[in-house]
Image (cartoon, rainbow, N blue to C red):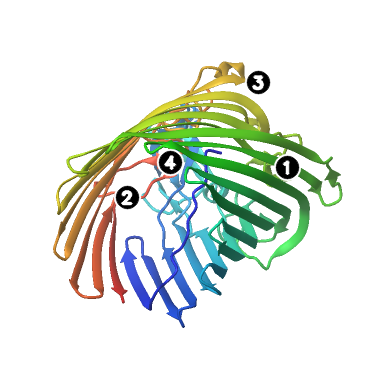
Amino acid sequence: MGGVINIITTTPKKREASAWIGYGGDDSKRYGAAMGDRFADRLSVSWGVEGEETGGYPTSLVTRPISKGNGDIYGGYPTQSTSGAPMWVVGDTGDNTARRLNLNLKAVYDYSRTGSLGVELQSGRHEYGYDPPHTYLSDRNGRGPVFSGKTDAWGSGYAGVSPSNYIAYTGNSEKTFNLYAVTYKEDSGLFNFTGRLGYEHKNFCYTSSSGARDQDYWNAPGTKSDADYDSWFSDLQANAPIGEKHLVTLGFYSRGDEYDGGGYDFAFYRDEDSRVRKTDITRGKARSYALYVQEEWRPIESVTLYGGVRADFWNAYDGMSGPVSELERFNESSDSSVSPKASAVWNPLKDTYLRTSIGEAFRPPTLYELYRTWSWSAGTYHSNPDLGPETLWNYEAGLDQYLLDRRLRLSVTAYHTDAYDLISTYWVGRDNYKDNLSRARINGIELEADVTPVKWLRFWGNYAYNQTEAIKNRRNPAADGKRLAGYPVMVMNLGAEVTYRWVKANIAGQYLGRTYASELNDDVQDVYGGNSRCWLWDTKLTMTPVKHIEFSFSVENMFNQGYFEYYKGPGRIYWTQLKYVW
């Protein structure tokens, strides 16, 4: 809701190419290649392929509650749930394997000195799954593996376990993405125009296990959720200078989305060919349009003022969801918003910049949030066709100061955000619901420093502090005044880089502060399902001993810090990579 990052890939001016291959811990591989060229001084073509795959590590622990009584099998260790209840770790769900592949192609034809026409194709695929689970249990004679029974909890009771516990919430997943776009540009001198039209298709599917307690990785039935997203979009923008002090931007954006999803029962949850029947259907469509205008005005050389307004129109329709034989159809919903913004940059001294801004943002609910209701072994996730948009007002002020002949940059930014009708999720027993529940406030400050004391040495660091607060939670007033779940209280980054001839070395660390998982801020940290406060450090050495050849060696999580971001974080990972650049 806070903004947009616009990534524009470069257009090659001459022939260029690169290729790389890398290998790292957990049997991980990275590879890729890219090439571009310009023909007849009119046509630029570039393409690339990039892939990664890993044997993975156990990201998910198998934890069981402790009951009164005695156990007759042994192993595992104690932990807690995020609510503080005693739990026992009996194993893990196996190595979480993954692979991804991305392809891209771009061609730009300069049909005149002022205009161009470009086409862009992108395709991506991401898959993940789980290898067989691991049990930490054995019988009283030390023989294993054991996947069922009552494990002794070091004299404090026992934890009951069955084979199905080791495959809960696991399965296979596949995501695909395809994008086709055409971009037209023209700069007449009086104005410049950019128009982009495109279509994208996404497919998300995943399976999960279900069945009796004694069914396991090798024979359990399951369910599958499969969804197709289709979107058409247009983005038209014109910039026109008026005199020497004004620049006016006009724009129009439109998007049409369609969701078609469903659920299936499978005889075997890891076999795509074992489909038994279709159980439920979800469909829906949405349209959104936006008109915007902005003026950039420089009344004096040291001051630049920006003012603009954006009008959004949104509606969702043809929504339906439910079991195949009991489909429920939903009424059309719509909303609109007029979002103003204003900002200013003042450059009172050569290397001093003061900036401030105020603006409103608007986000309508997604088709998934509105219509998708589905069930699995953990419970039922309910949609809400009556959801409304989220809105916010954001206020910022900051200072950028350069010193030491611009070898030192210092920045500070303070911000305040008021958010309204935030879409929240919550559980009632085994049912998960969505609603516009909360009004919230976020106050924060960001500090940043970047210094290059000598040509071959650089240091950098930044610090962000978030003071979040739920002002009003309509469902749970006890959450009023609490911090928002999912927002770290503090984030800090530090780094240094040394460059000497054909050798470059750097080290970088990130500190993750307290992040609450519960709206009441009463969750236990540093346990599976929760979050950890910790420093994570990475380092990398890059060498270019000969022209065109680059070799690198890196270590991620170099101090082998154990931590959780819901899932268990990876330990220390080593990487080597060889790259050819031409």
- Disc 3, disc 2: CB below 8 Å? no
Depicted 535 relative to depicted 443: above or below: below
Q: Quadrant of residue 332?
A: top right
Alpha-carbon distance for marks 4 and 2? 13 Å
- Lateral position of residue 276 relative to residue 198, left or right: right
- Residue shown at the point (72%, 56%) measured from the top left: 265
From the viewer's side, name the closer residue of 223 and 306. 306
State the residue lying farthest toward the front: 243
Residue type, mark 3 in image = Arg
Residue 154, percent across and down? 37, 33
Q: Which residue is mark 2?
A: 571
From the viewer's side, name the closer residue of 392 and 464. 392
Q: Which residue is mark 4?
A: 565
- Residue shown at the point (55%, 41%) measured from the top left: 295
Alpha-carbon distance for marks 4 and 3? 28 Å
Give whichever of discs 1 and 3 has the lower sequence position: 1
